[in-house]
Image: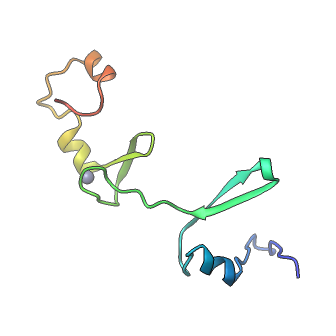
Amino acid sequence: MPDRIDKLGRIVIPKRIRISCDLPIGAELEFVPAPESGGVLVRKKEKHTCAFCHAGEQLTEIDDGIFLCRNCIRKHVFPKSCKKTAEAKSFGRFLCN
Ligand SMILES: [Zn+2]
């Protein structure tokens, strides 16, 4: 029987696929358009954590794939004591050192 999207927009991932792809019940997924294959890619959603303290909450992506939590941004990214000029900050990386 072909798989179908039901009237609520849901799909079922066959058990053999879930097992072979290590997708337990409750796994967070994301859907990515894959026009080159005429379909949709379903993959595990990456769990992002703070690059400094590994917290998983209140994250901001400060560069491609690099996340910092609110506390570490407050502590490490250009604190009030930072003497860099605004121009230097715009060309520098994220840290005041
Ligand atoms: Zn942090």
How many numbered discs?
A: 0
In the rendered structure, the answer to whether residue 31 lies left or right of residue 8 reads: left
Quick one: 29 or 59, which is closer to the camera? 29
Quick one: 5 or 14, which is closer to the camera? 14
Residue 12: percent from left, percent from top: 72, 78
Q: Quadrant of residue 61?
A: top left
Q: Quadrant of residue 18?
A: bottom right
Residue 81: percent from left, percent from top: 11, 30
Residue appearing at x 29%, y 24% in the figure = 92
The quadrant of the image that shows the C terminus is top left
Quick one: 71 or 96, which is closer to the camera? 96
Q: Quadrant of residue 56?
A: bottom left
Farthest residue, direction right:
1
In the rendered structure, the answer to whether residue 80 lies left or right of residue 13 reads: left
Establish if 81 lies above or below 13.
Answer: above
Residue 34: percent from left, percent from top: 73, 51
Residue appearing at x 19%, y 30% in the figure = 96
Residue 10: percent from left, percent from top: 73, 73
The quadrant of the image that shows the N terminus is bottom right
Farthest residue, direction left:
81
Residue appearing at x 60%, y 81% in the figure = 19
Residue appearing at x 53%, y 78% in the figure = 26
**Which color scheme did the rendering employ for the protein?**
rainbow
